[in-house]
């Protein structure tokens, strides 16, 4: 029998009704043994996530303001869940302890992590599962990065000892014993880590949508659903702004080739999207798996005769960027030209200094910076086999009367990146979607 690790997001655990749905999902499949909960999320649009309320508690405590009112709202959220589930569970000691710890500066991450911790305690009690505190099994290194090896070793041993358990998401512990969280949405990462540690056959990530769409529905009307996507394709799309799963959640399971299934807690009958290591199967009619894009890029273009034969030219350019702690996104180049695509936010306040430093370092014939560039990624494993995909993408954009400012085909052959003016962004996305899907 395989093991399934299930992670439930904040919207899946926002109130008692959702807790009941979660319990039903878990009871319907005995392989679902390990559960990773988020903190209670929004119950309606204007509602506030418990994590956000905890961040506010921290800020108020730091400013020596009273946290009584906001903290009592947090307690009320948990209490209503406990009461409506009919649980005989006295959490008053825990609530008091956490409040005091926040007041006595246990840190911002500690405060935020208590959303998952308290929710995990309640969920474990409700399900009758063991509670494994993430602070005993998820480790960070001195420099703040995640300690994958130690975590895997300790967590695997701990999981092997129990049949069913709840492990709260989002946080772990630093070598000095303080609590540290992953970045926002980080319970997805914990779920992936747990799946790797128990060598799960499947990591189910339960949320409030039935998986991924081929494009952002705010830009493309009623986009098609994606049934199967590879880790690599997803990585390309999520880097370009497609969000459902935390970007870093792929790494632990990818390593162990464990598939991820994005599922909808409110529609458990939907199959969702399957994220797999490899798949040769793709929809021959569509070829592409998805399209995503982002605005907010700048391009530095450098021209120099005979650039191709000048040893060290590229290195000197990149050295300058490194000295300003700027990371670049794409580097399309020609014989005598080199363009560097950089997120505009990285250049803020230092653009002019970088230009002067580049002029000093490589003394180019021409150097220019342009802003307001948007990037569009067309991604699909089917593109490796299908001839003429780039031509179709470019023609579709050109026919929408858009000027293409940059093209970069990834060496993996599963993506083509196109740069267009921000004002042409939506139009271009629609043109590509219509060409391949409609
Ligand atoms: N509760 C945390 C957040 O709101 C982590 C998570 O939900 O994954 O970011």
Image (spheres, grey):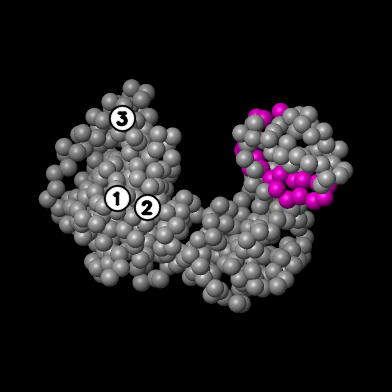
Residue designated by label 2: 193
Mark 2 lies on a secondary structure that is helix
The answer to whether the residue labelled 1 contacts the one labelled 2, judged by CB atoms less than 8 Å apart, is: yes
Judge the density around disc 1: few (<14), some (14-19), many (≥20) Cα neighbours within 10 Å. Answer: many
Residue at (65%, 31%) from the top-left corner?
323
Judge the density around disc 2: few (<14), some (14-19), many (≥20) Cα neighbours within 10 Å. Answer: many
Numbered-mark total? 3
Q: Nearer the viewer, residue 61 or 108?
A: 108
Q: Nearer the viewer, residue 173 or 199?
A: 199
Circle nearer the viewer, 3 or 1: 1
What's the magenta region? 331-353
Q: Is residue 284 above or below residue 264?
A: below
Q: Is residue 298 above or below residue 381?
A: above
Residue 80 appears in the figure:
no
Mark 1 lies on a secondary structure that is helix
Mark 3 lies on a secondary structure that is loop
Circle nearer the viewer, 3 or 2: 2
Query: On the rendered structure, is 91 left or right of 220?
Result: left
């Amino acid at each position: 029998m395989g093991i399934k690790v299930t992670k439930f997001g904040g919207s899946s655990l926002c109130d008692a009704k959702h807790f009941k749905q979660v319990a039903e999902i878990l009871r319907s499949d005995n392989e679902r043994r390990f559960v990773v909960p988020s903190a209670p999320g929004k119950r309606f649009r204007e509602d506030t996530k418990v994590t956000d309320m905890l961040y506010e508690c921290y800020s108020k405590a730091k400013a020596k303001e009273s946290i009584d009112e906001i903290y009592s709202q947090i307690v009320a959220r948990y209490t209503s869940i406990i009461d409506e589930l009919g649980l005989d569970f006295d959490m008053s000691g825990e609530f008091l302890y956490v409040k005091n710890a926040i007041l006595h500066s246990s840190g911002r991450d500690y405060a935020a992590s208590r959303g998952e911790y308290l929710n995990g305690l309640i969920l474990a009690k409700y399900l009758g599962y063991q509670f494994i505190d993430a602070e005993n099994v998820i480790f960070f290194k001195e420099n703040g990065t995640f300690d994958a090896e130690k975590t895997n070793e300790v967590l695997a041993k701990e999981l092997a000892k129990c049949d069913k358990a709840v492990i709260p998401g989002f946080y772990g512990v630093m070598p000095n014993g303080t609590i540290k969280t992953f970045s926002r949405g980080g319970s997805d990462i914990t779920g992936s880590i747990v799946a790797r540690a128990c060598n799960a056959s499947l990591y189910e990530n339960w949320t409030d949508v039935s998986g991924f769409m081929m494009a952002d529905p705010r830009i493309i009307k009623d986009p098609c659903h994606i049934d199967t996507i590879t880790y690599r394709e997803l990585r390309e799309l999520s880097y370009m702004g497609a969000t459902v799963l935390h970007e870093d959640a792929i790494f632990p399971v990818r390593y162990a080739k464990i598939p991820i299934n994005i599922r909808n807690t409110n529609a458990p009958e939907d199959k969702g999207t399957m994220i797999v290591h490899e798949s040769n199967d793709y929809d021959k009619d569509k070829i592409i798996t998805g399209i995503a894009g982002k605005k907010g890029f700048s391009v530095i273009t450098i021209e120099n005769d005979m650039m191709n034969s000048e040893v060290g030219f590229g290195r000197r350019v990149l050295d300058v960027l490194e000295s300003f702690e700027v990371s670049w996104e794409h580097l399309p180049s020609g014989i005598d030209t080199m363009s560097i695509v950089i997120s505009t936010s990285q250049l803020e306040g230092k653009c002019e200094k970088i230009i002067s430093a580049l002029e000093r370092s490589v003394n180019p014939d021409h150097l220019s910076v342009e802003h307001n560039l948007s990037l569009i990624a067309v991604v699909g494993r089917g593109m490796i086999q299908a001839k003429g995909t780039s031509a179709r993408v470019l023609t579709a954009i050109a026919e929408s009367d858009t000027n293409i400012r940059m093209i970069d085909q990834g060496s993996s052959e599963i993506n083509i990146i196109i740069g267009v003016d921000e004002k042409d962004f939506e139009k271009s996305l629609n043109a590509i979607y219509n060409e391949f899907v409609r």
